[in-house]
Image (cartoon, coloured by chain):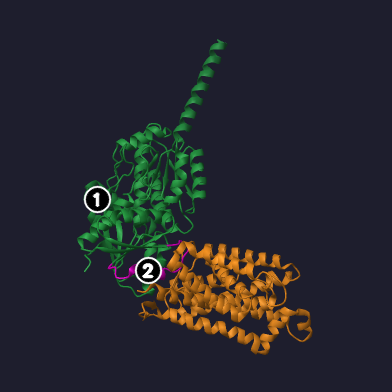
């Protein structure tokens, strides 16, 4: 009898331990790594986009998480510098993050990419990256080339064949300039290009060099430093239409330039900035739901950057819900390449392209009476 | 637009600001024989204060400006009174490092108060820019140039042409002898730092509406002021001319060689001149660099 009692007790103990460990395993949260420039010159970009992600995680956790597991959003501030970005990436890799969401600038993303040769999957919003399909990097936004083509279409619709452009001297600016030359020159649009340093506090000389007799100017310069270009534009008393890059279509940036607003301010926006441009009912419903939640939480409407953060969140959620083992980077990659992502825009990756959105998601918008609308023609 | 004319106008505007900053460094050096690397923070502090108060829209802009100038003066005097005066027997290198520490401390304070974004405030003088030979000079820019150079020119006149100015210089040349002659050396230094703080603040009030300011603008401004002052051998009149030259030089380099060439060329020229004058650089006296 004694051995039997002993065995029963042992069996009960083992069962208890097993159920406890299963419970502990089930309670272990999904670690979603976020790399974002929360401080530094690109802070206006990071803070907005990350606000959207935090709202997503909070809502999901309040609803019970995914498969009984909470989402732990581990936000790491890369300050917009490659060296800090690498530190952030290492941290997420060491923590076995299920997925990394990166809303930082291209130079930091390029610094991280070699670290991810074995995963985890990283999803980015920067339009400059155009990830290698062999890599574990995916991009939810349309590429910078497609965005530039949208501007070209607008110029051609308005019969404009000359363009002044300002780009920064960093990696993003280098890509902007290269794509502009690739898109505008073959299409017969004469491009006058000047570059500006990220630390410059005056762009008068650059503007004087490129504006000349050009009827419109495009500032591809992202971040708060782009306010320098707008201020200098106002200082010179220029009146031609001014096109902002999509990274600057935020309330924070509008507040920065409110005393220097150009007479006509345009921007390269994504359709989901304006609900009336979103035609798919599912996308529109998701967009409306997010806008309502964001407005309630942040007491302001979501900026384009916050909305771009939603595409990251939706991609992450799709992976967490549908991939059995999120620690298997190859499985996550295969899933993303074969499954459309339900979001506020059409996101579709493939084994041949890790860029999820195309030109159909981009519109030229105009800032009028305190909000963005579809752009009027150039008179 | 004519890029050359615009470069001249932009260069003169920046030259006016550099003149005010370099003069602030010079007057402090001529009184206390210390290079104050926290000097540019008076610019950042003033610009940030005006921008913050203006954004709150509870006080008129002129009140914000007065508060900003007062804040900059208080900071500048505090550096002298609490950081440098108790340590006046320390080596010059140590004192310079202390002022650098003060500058970095202010970076942290401003970052905490205004965050990482650049800030600005409305122009004091608005209106269409003056168009001259293909260049454009906004009314605020004209105000900056006139006030900046007038204030900068007032300092050499003050130092050499007034009894108080001579007292300030005596306090630096030989503090003990000056004290014996009835000069209150401590008060002279406070006055010098206060004037320097005011100049940095006025530079910000005039320039920030045209550009912007953030938490780390101060050191950039200190560096520009120091380059002009060092090229001038800490002579007030030459500092004004060197400031103008620096502003114009930066503008021409940006125009003809691109923005990335600005810092390398400017610092290359500085190094070249420093090497050329390495036996002749004087810091307000007969001592070698």
Question: Measured from the top left, where is residue A291 in percent x and y?
Answer: 31, 54
Q: Is residue A24 above or below residue A211?
A: above
Q: Secondary structure at mark 1?
A: helix
Image spot of residue A183 (x, y percent)? 29, 54
Mark 2 closeness class: few <14, some 14–19, many ≥20 residues within 10 Å: many
Instruction: Tell me residue A345's x, y (percent).
Output: 28, 48
Chain B is which colour?
A: orange
Q: CA distance from mark 1 to mark 2?
A: 33 Å
Residue segment shown in magenta = A196-215
Closer to the chain start, of discs 1 and 2, is 2
The extreme top residue here reads A1
Q: Residue at x 35, y 42 (%)?
A: A315
Q: Which residue is mark 2?
A: A209
Give left or right: position of A102 versus B162: left
Are discs 1 and 2 both within one chain?
A: yes
Residue at the bottom extreme of this rendering = B162
The chain carrying label 2 is A
**Quarter of the figure with residue A341:** top left
Circle 2 — which element? helix
Label 1 packing within 10 angstroms: few (<14), some (14-19), many (20+) = some
Residue under numbered circle 1: A360
- Chain to which mark 1 belongs: A
- Which corner quadrant of the image does residue A215 belong to? bottom left
Position of residue B165 relative to residue A89, above or below, is: below
Q: Is residue A370 visible?
A: yes
Q: Is residue B67 visible?
A: no
Foreground mark, 1 or 2, reads 2
Residue A5 drawn above or below residue B211:
above
């Amino acid at each position: 009898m004694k051995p039997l009692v002993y065995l029963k007790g042992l069996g009960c103990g083992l069962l208890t331990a097993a159920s406890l460990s299963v419970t502990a395993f089930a309670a272990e949260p999904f670690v979603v790594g976020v790399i974002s420039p929360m401080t530094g010159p690109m802070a206006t970009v990071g803070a907005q986009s990350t606000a959207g992600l935090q709202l997503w995680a909070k809502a999901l956790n309040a609803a019970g998480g995914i498969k009984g597991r909470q989402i732990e959003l581990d936000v790491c501030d890369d300050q917009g510098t490659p060296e800090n970005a690498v530190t952030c990436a290492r941290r997420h890799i060491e923590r076995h993050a299920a997925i990394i969401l990166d809303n930082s600038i291209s130079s930091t993303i390029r610094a991280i990419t070699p670290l991810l040769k074995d995963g985890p999957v990283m999803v980015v919003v920067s339009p400059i990256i155009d990830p290698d399909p062999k890599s574990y990097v995916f991009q939810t936004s349309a590429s910078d080339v497609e965005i530039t083509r949208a501007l070209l279409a607008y110029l051609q619709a308005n019969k404009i064949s000359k363009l002044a452009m300002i780009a920064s001297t960093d990696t993003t600016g280098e890509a902007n300039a290269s794509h502009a030359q690739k898109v505008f020159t073959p299409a017969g649009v004469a491009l006058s290009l000047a570059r500006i340093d990220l630390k410059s506090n005056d762009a008068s000389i650059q503007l004087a060099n490129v504006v000349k007799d050009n009827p419109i100017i495009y500032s591809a310069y992202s971040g708060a430093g782009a306010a320098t270009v707008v201020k200098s534009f106002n200082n010179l008393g220029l009146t031609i239409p001014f096109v902002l890059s999509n990274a600057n279509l935020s309330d924070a940036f509008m507040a920065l330039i409110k005393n220097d607003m150009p007479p006509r301010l345009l921007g390269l926006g994504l359709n989901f900035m304006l609900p009336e441009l979103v035609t798919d009912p599912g996308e529109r419903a998701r967009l409306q739901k997010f806008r309502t939640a964001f407005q309630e939480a942040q007491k302001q409407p979501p900026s384009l950057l916050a909305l771009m953060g939603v595409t990251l969140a939706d991609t992450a959620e799709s992976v967490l819900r549908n991939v059995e083992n999120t620690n298997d980077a190859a499985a996550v990659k295969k899933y993303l390449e074969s499954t459309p992502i339900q979001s506020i825009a059409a996101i579709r990756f493939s084994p041949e392209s890790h860029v999820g959105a195309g030109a159909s998601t981009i519109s030229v918008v105009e800032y009028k009476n305190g909000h963005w609308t579809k752009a009027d023609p150039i008179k | 637009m004519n890029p050359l004319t615009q470069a001249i106008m932009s260069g003169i505007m920046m030259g006016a600001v550099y003149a005010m900053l370099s003069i602030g460094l010079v007057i402090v050096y001529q009184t206390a024989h210390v290079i104050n690397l926290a000097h540019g923070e008076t610019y950042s502090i003033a610009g940030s204060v005006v921008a913050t108060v203006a954004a709150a829209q509870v006080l008129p802009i002129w009140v914000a400006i007065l508060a900003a100038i007062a804040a900059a003066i208080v900071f500048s005097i505090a550096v002298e009174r609490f950081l440098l005066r108790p340590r006046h027997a320390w080596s010059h290198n140590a004192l310079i490092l202390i002022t650098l520490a003060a500058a970095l401390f202010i970076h942290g304070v401003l970052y905490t108060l205004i965050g990482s974004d650049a800030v600005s405030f409305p122009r004091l003088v608005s209106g269409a820019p003056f168009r001259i030979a293909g260049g454009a000079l906004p009314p605020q820019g004209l105000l900056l140039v006139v006030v900046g150079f007038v204030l900068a020119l007032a300092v050499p006149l003050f130092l050499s042409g007034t009894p108080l100015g001579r007292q300030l210089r005596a306090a630096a040349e030989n503090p003990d002898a000056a004290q014996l002659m009835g000069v209150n050396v401590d008060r002279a230094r406070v006055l010098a730092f206060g004037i320097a703080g005011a100049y940095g603040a006025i530079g910000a009030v005039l320039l920030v509406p045209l550009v912007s300011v953030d938490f780390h603008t101060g050191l950039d401004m200190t560096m520009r002021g120091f380059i002009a002052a060092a090229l001038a051998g800490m002579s007030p009149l030459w500092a004004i001319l060197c400031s103008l030259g620096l502003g114009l030089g930066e503008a021409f380099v940006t125009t003809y060689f691109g923005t990335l060439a600005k810092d390398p060329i400017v610092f290359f020229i500085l190094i070249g001149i420093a090497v050329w004058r390495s036996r002749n650089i004087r810091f307000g006296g007969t001592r070698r660099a």
